[in-house]
Image: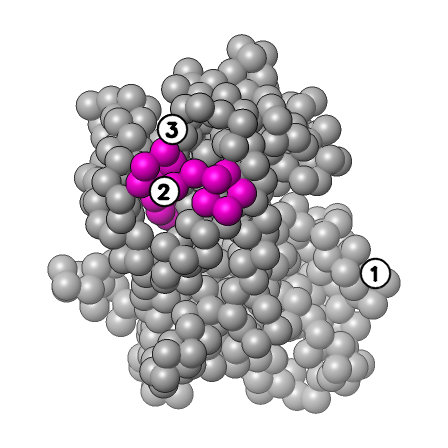
Amino acid sequence: MKLAFIGLGYVGLTTAVCMAYRGFDVVGVEVDDEKVEKISRGIAPVKEPKLEKLLKYALSRKKFTASTSYRDAVKADVFFITVGTPSKPDGGIDLSRVAEACKHIGETLATQEKVATVAVKSTVVPGTTRTLVKQKLEEASQKKVGMDLNLCVNPEFLREGAAVDDTFHPDRIVIGDDWGRGGKILTRLYKKFYGRKTPPTMITNTVNAEMIKYASNVFLAARISLINEVANICQRTPGADVEEVAKGIGMDRRIGPHFLRAGLGYGGSCFPKDVKALAAFAKSLGVEPCMLESVQKVNDNQPYKAIELAERLVGNLHGRKAAVLGLSFKPNTDDIREAVSLKIINKLLEHGCTVVAYDPAATENVRRLLGNKINYAESAEECIKNADFCIVATEWDEFRRLKPEVFKKHMKKPVVIDGRRVYDPAAIS
Ligand code: UDX
């Protein structure tokens, strides 16, 4: 089976390369020629553990090629749409890249006799595949979905920084199909890919599959905001420790232990965007998204808890030297989209602080954004040197390994605001 991935972001590229690694012939189509050039030389444009190794292997075996031209995908049996769906200013999603991809896939398929399958992996609001995607494909291909063209939805649940492992070991596969054949073809493809270890597979209609993706992300985001609100209450309750509380509630099988890490809130390219998009979608239907708006509100305020704590601990922040450890939105990535560190840094600058930041991977991305508004350190030790206070904004393992003595030795006073709960407070005080 020949596969094409349209859009080589972290989802498209990772899935494409994993498929190629397991023996499928895969073509990746991407409009950004610089990206294509890099990928073709075996360089992954996103920092993702294991990805580059697999990419090099797939290229060397000629199982994977990247191209800017849809013509190179003409022989594909299955086209996965993996383009981005960014937020519009009103929070709704911008489907223009999906529409563009459908047009090009349709034009490519117009030249082909065979019945190909198109699978939408991009996160799209419920109903998009049955309407926009179907219409664009049919217009451009002059084919009919359900007759000489198959269409289905196949959302991805990959975490950045763990995308390769998540591709090889997903909890479940969700496929939405309104017409009957596309879903069967994808099920067969995944059987080949996973063999005896095929994960539980759910087949439903396209709208449910699209909604499952959003609902999964808003549920996880809601857990984070909920535990953060509990943490804020604990903070003002003598004797209460949210970590103990999270441990206790996580033992209830109905709740479970995951995604209960309290801290400075969620960032990244998915949760903020998806909560906003589902809220905008709800409003368009006349549904008041009370929960979703609260999830967002808690998360919007959460990074500033670090500033409040700093003020409580050192007084007026004006003229103080602040050290920020961690810039990426989470560890093991250089991605700074919606990173809490940026909100914190901007607020510290507003307060008149001098900011020094350090991150094991994301410094260059922040430098491009903030330039010389802040200073950049080469190591955690250099970052905290003579600082009045330090805020840990990302839970990199490298920070976990820092001993309390390091803070005591380098800082004016060891005032550490551990926004990601990486240290044992008893050890540092
Ligand atoms: C998420 C989903 O996990 C994934 O299934 C989906 O496909 C894309 O969105 P990702 O954004 O890569 O993945 O990161 P994730 O590990 O889920 O973390 C998101 C944010 O939540 C991070 O900023 C993280 O620090 C924060 N988080 C996570 C918490 O604050 N507490 C937690 O308990 C878990």
Q: Secondary structure at mark 3?
A: loop
Dot 2 beta carbon under 8 Å from ligand 1: no
Assess disc 1: are there few (<14), some (14-19) or many (≥20) residues with their C-alpha within 10 Å of its C-alpha: few
User: Where is mark 3, residue-wise?
Assistant: 115
When the figure is inspected, residue 385 is found, relative to residue 142, above or below; the finding is below
Q: Quadrant of residue 13?
A: top right
Q: Are marks 3 and 2 in contact (CB under 8 Å)?
A: no
Segment tinted magenta in the rendering: 138-158
User: Where is mark 2, residue-wise?
Assistant: 145
Identify the residue shown where x is 38% and y is 41%.
Answer: 144
Q: Amino acid at mark 3?
A: Val
Q: Position of residue 185 (x, y in %)?
A: 29, 30
Question: Disc 3 or 2, which lies upstream in sequence?
Answer: 3
Q: CA distance from mark 1 to mark 2?
A: 50 Å
Q: Amino acid at mark 1?
A: Gly
Identify the residue shown where x is 52% and y is 77%.
Answer: 300
User: Where is mark 1, residue-wise?
Assistant: 371
Q: Residue furthest front?
A: 142
Based on the picture, tell me whether residue 153 belongs to the magenta stretch: yes
Q: Is residue 67 visible?
A: yes
